[in-house]
Image: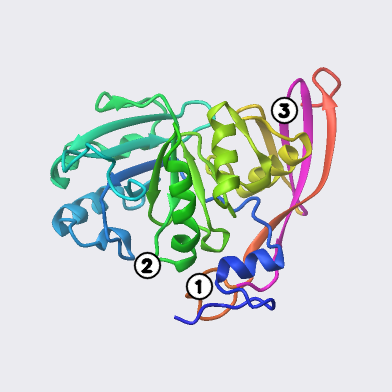
Amino acid sequence: MRLPTAPDGSRGCSALARYTGEQIAATAGTTGGWLLVEHPGPWRHPAFASPGLDKAVVSKLAERIVGRDVKPQLIKRPGGRRPGEGQGPRRAYYAHTSRTTPWVRMVEFEDLAELLEYDVTAVEKPEPPDFGVPVEHSLYLVCTHAKKDPCCAVLGRPVAAALAGGPAEVWETTHVGGDRFAANLVALPQGHYFGRLDPESAVRTVTAFERGDVVPDNYRGRCTDSSAVQAADAALRSRLGTVGVDAVAHLDEEYTDDDVRVTLGHGGGVYTVSVTAEEGPECATTCSAIAPSRPVRHRVTEITEGRVGAGAR
């Protein structure tokens, strides 16, 4: 594969995007439900065509989620299973991302066919199902899917390794979107995406998230929100600095012919953020892209502040 090359000689879609300073805000995919299936790999692309996965079972699972708001992912421990875990049961996580009702349930399985016993579409619903064990902490997914894009593996694996020794539950995962923003990390069930991470910034990001805060430096957006709301949320967080995971409330969004006006709340203040959608500069969206494209970017043009009870809502 011939990797795209930046003018400074650095190679790969991620290096080119860093060189050009491509905007990472408002680039998180929009997803309400997640199915995470532990599978040690190797991973192919598409992920669920990987060796060791029962094709008949995968086909049945696919039939159940086609057209649904469910994102299936393969996951594995950074560097393999931890000492003492042996070859015992694997894990599957069912996660619902939401600003108001996020939840995660975990089930263990020996055979992939066991997952057919559970309603995978439950992850679309705000009420958790009656199966599985409740997971009360965050899960951190680091994309290391080499067969999808080499940047994800080259940049993602050191990040996963750096996080693996800490108290947070970290998994390597298959494609989450935004190869050129590698290394990418997703925090579930809250749905926050981070990109352009290195080991140091990843540790800083996860450490802050574990205490309930979002560091805005590498923030891509929240998969619970539209692209316009993601742009507004990221811009306001950049202005406020490090604030709580749920400290910025989404109050409203109004679409006009020219822009989107997003209303956000924080600490008694109400902010109206104007966001325009425009065609971005040419870029290689992946290392395997045959030709450059112009993805839409969402640009914040204005932030105005009011107070509750002062006419702003």
Contact between labelled residues 2 and 3, with CB atoms less than 8 Å apart: no
Disc 2 is placed on an element classified as loop
Could you tell which of marks 3 and 1 lies nearer the N-terminus? 3
Residue 49 image-quadrant placement: bottom left
Residue 45 image-quadrant placement: bottom left
Q: CA distance from mark 3 to mark 1?
A: 39 Å
Count of residue discs: 3
Query: Looking at the magenta stretch, what is its main secondary structure?
Result: strand
Up-down relation of residue 210 to residue 1 (above or below): above
Which residue lies under the disc numbered 1? 287
- Local crowd size for mark 2, using a 10 Å CA cut-off: few (<14), some (14–19), many (≥20): some
Spot occupied by residue 82 in the image (x, y as percentages of width and height)? 29, 41
Q: Which residues are magenta?
A: 258-283
Contact between labelled residues 2 and 1, with CB atoms less than 8 Å apart: no
Q: How is the image coloured?
A: rainbow
Which residue lies under the disc numbered 3? 265
Which residue lies under the disc numbered 2? 147
Q: Residue at image x 60%, y 68%?
A: 15
- Local crowd size for mark 1, using a 10 Å CA cut-off: few (<14), some (14–19), many (≥20): many
Could you tell which of marks 1 and 2 lies nearer the N-terminus? 2
Observer able to see residue 245: no
Q: Residue at image x 69%, y 68%?
A: 19
Specify the amino acid type for callout 2.
Answer: Lys
Could you tell which of marks 3 and 2 lies nearer the N-terminus? 2
Specify the amino acid type for callout 3.
Answer: Gly
Q: Nearer the viewer, mark 3 or mark 2?
A: 2
Q: Is 286 left or right of 233, judged from the image as shown?
A: left
Specify the amino acid type for callout 1.
Answer: Cys
Q: Is 23 left or right of 291, judged from the image as shown?
A: right
Q: Is 76 left or right of 152, judged from the image as shown?
A: left
